[in-house]
Image (cartoon, rainbow, N blue to C red):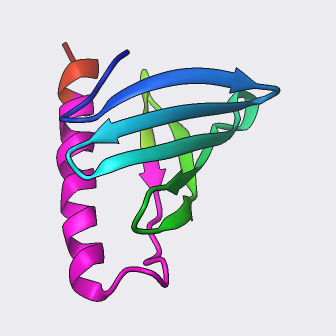
Amino acid sequence: MAGVGDRQHEVGQAGIRRLARYRDRKGKGQLKMLSSKAFGILDHMWKDPQASWIVPARLVPNGEGCTLLMTFFPPPALDDQAFATASKEIDRELNRLKEILER
């Protein structure tokens, strides 16, 4: 088990796709990676009891490191307020991940 923020996850692999099952204060969720290392593609599908959606993500070389680009489209199951709340949680988790990676 590993975690960022308040999420705990188990990682498995099925073919080229990676699957992580999460448990956080809201319940269970799944994150399925749809990636290509050669092209810097880190698209993933998120699924939890509230909603599911695909998040396009790219790693772009940038000097000695890289820049992560992610695009979030509100899933139909979330209203504007729920999407804003989810976006804030994602920002918090990405900032924490950035702190970990920059140590």
State the residue at coordinates (44%, 67%): 72
Prevailing secondary structure of the magenta residues: helix
Residue 97 lies within the magenta run: yes
Q: Quadrant of residue 5?
A: top left
Give the image quarter of residue 50: bottom left
Percent across and percent down for residue 64 are: 42, 21
Tell me residue 28's x, y (percent): 39, 45
Vertical comparison of 13 with 28: above or below: above
**In this rendering, position of residue 56 left or right of residue 82:** right
Q: In this view of the protein, which residue sits in the foreground, 60 or 76?
A: 76
Residue at 26% of width from left, 29% of height from top? 4
The vertical placement of 49 against 41, above or below, is: below
**Rendered view: 6 above or below 14:** below
Location of the N terminus (image quadrant): top left
Percent across and percent down for residue 49 are: 42, 61
- In this view, the residue in front, 51 or 59, is 51
Between 64 and 72, which is closer to the camera in this rendering?
72
Question: Which residues are the magenta region?
Answer: 69-98
Q: Position of residue 47 (x, y in %)?
A: 51, 56
In the displayed orientation, state which residue is furthest to the right: 15
Q: Is residue 14 left or right of residue 84?
A: right
The residue depicted at 19 percent of the width and 12 percent of the height is 103
Figure quadrant of residue 41: top right
In the figure, is residue 34 to the left or right of 24? Answer: right
What residue is rendered at 19% in x and 35% in y?
A: 6
- Quick check: 52 above or below 61? below
Q: Nearer the viewer, residue 58 or 96?
A: 96
